Image (cartoon, rainbow, N blue to C red):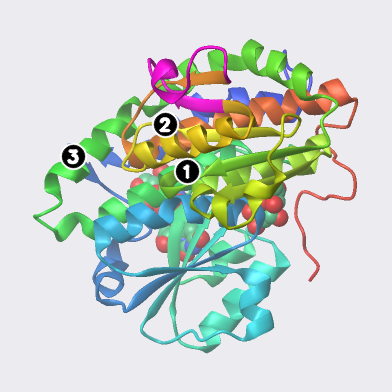
Amino acid sequence: KKGSYDHFMQKEIHEQPHSLTTTMRGRLKDGEVLLGGLKEHLKTIRRCRRVVFIGCGTSYNAALGARTFVEELTGIPVTMEVASDLLDRQGPIYREDTAVFVSQSGETADTLLALDYALENGALCVGITNTVGSTLSRKTHCGVHINAGCEIGVASTKAYTSQIVAMAMMALAIGSDQISTQARRNAIISGLTSLPSCVSEVLKLDAEMKDLASSLIDSESLLVFGRGYNYATALEGALKVKEVALMHSEGMLAGEMKHGPLALVDENLPIIVIATRDACFSKQQSVIQQLLSRKGRLIVMCSKGDASAVCSIGSCRVIEVPGVADCLQPVINIIPLQLLAYHLTVLRGFDVDQPRNLAKSVTTQ
Ligand code: UD1
Ligand code: F6R
């Protein structure tokens, strides 16, 4: 089933132009988004007091990546909950809330317990899942199947990008009654249409990521700095490196750098800074300058053609990625980090598809 690939994770990373196409198939028509599973519930969702995203691990990160554009396109405040933490705190969930549960498997115990809790509290419960017939799909009031195809590698890759795209379509559908954001919605819909080809393009960085991995093979730790739309990319890139390459890694909010993490910076610790074009670009430029002035060992991810705008030649390693609509950029930016985690794992001699101590679906609390 792996075809010409050595591992499922590798196959699933390279499959993303296709899995994203199937996520969108039949759902973007004549500049409109059609989500059969939400159609009857859009009015209720538009009236809700807030959206609460709930998930674990990669699925939580995908929801975090979607948060900004859901707020922007719907005008509804969005709060984030890690499923286990919501349960630990017995945090407030109200009848007026729309609780959106994100889970690849649809069988994660923490997420399902949080679903029971939200159902008891009377919230409208929406599922975003890859698994038709899963407990999540059956128990939620409505939802969207992401249709990414079966994911076998324990490290979630193609489900992450399809979850973000499914949530982008959800945000477009909820916001479709707003005239003021029509132009923005049209731009995002056309961005979605060209996304699979941009993903094919960014996958060409495979050899470059393998080379980068070989330079990081003996590092003890790797930091990833992101902000705005790409804070989620930083968390998710670091999660991949931890779980498969078994290397300590942390995703950090770049705006928090000066409030502590800056103390770690020296010439040995590798730091990836995500600085693709969006409203936060100039702030990321200044983060890069501050890190360079402390002799940080930087790897900067930037939009194509921006290498000299992000750092002076020779002062850091640059990964150039194709630019897409700012809110869809996380779908592109995670891919070099997935490739990096994959190659780092192989080069360090660890098991890619069955990382130590992990199972594909965590069905215990
Ligand atoms: C559906 C069909 C699809 C068909 C399409 C044609 C299914 C599973 N999907 O897709 O095969 O090609 O119509 O119009 O038969 N749901 C939940 N919770 C979740 C996910 C989904 O309750 O977590 C519900 C939805 O509200 C919906 C149903 O499951 O009622 C199917 O969802 P989805 O597959 O996303 O719907 P369509 O895209 O319309
Ligand atoms: C990371 C990973 C886990 C899962 C998490 C939630 O690669 O696979 O962090 O994302 O266990 O799983 P689902 O999405 O099935 O609820």
Q: Distance of mark 1 from mark 3, alpha carbons?
A: 22 Å
Residue 186 is marked as: 3
The quarter of the picture where the C terminus appears is: bottom right
Is 225 left or right of 304, judged from the image as shown? right
Label 1 crowding class (10 Å Cα cut-off): few <14, some 14-19, many 20+? many
Query: Do the residues under discs 1 and 2 have CB atoms within 8 angstroms?
Result: yes
Residue type at the position of mark 2: Thr
In the image, residue 278 lies at what x, y percent?
33, 38
Q: Amino acid at mark 1?
A: Asn
Q: Are marks 1 and 3 in contact (CB under 8 Å)?
A: no
| Residue 115 to residue 8: above or below | below
**Residue with the mark numbered 2:** 276
Which of these two is toward me, 308 or 71? Answer: 308
Of residues 172 and 2, the one drawn nearer to the viewer in this rendering? 172
Q: Residue at 68% x, 49% y: name it.
A: 263
Label 2 SS = loop
Amino acid identity at mark 3: Asn
Foreground tag (1 vs 3):
1
The answer to whether the residues at label 3 and label 2 have Cβ atoms under 8 Å apart is no
Span of residues in magenta: 300-316
CA distance separating discs 3 and 2:
22 Å
The image shows residue 272, relative to residue 94, as above or below, that is above
Q: Which residue is nearer to you in this view: 150 or 291?
A: 291
Disc 1 target residue: 230
Question: Is residue 73 depicted above or below 2 in this figure?
Answer: below
Of the image marks 1 and 3, the number of the one nearer the N terminus: 3
Q: Residues within 10 Å of mark 3 (few under 14, many from 20)?
A: some
Tell me the residue at 39%/21% (across/down): 309
Residue 224 x/y as whole percent:
62, 40
- Residue 45 falls in image quadrant: bottom left
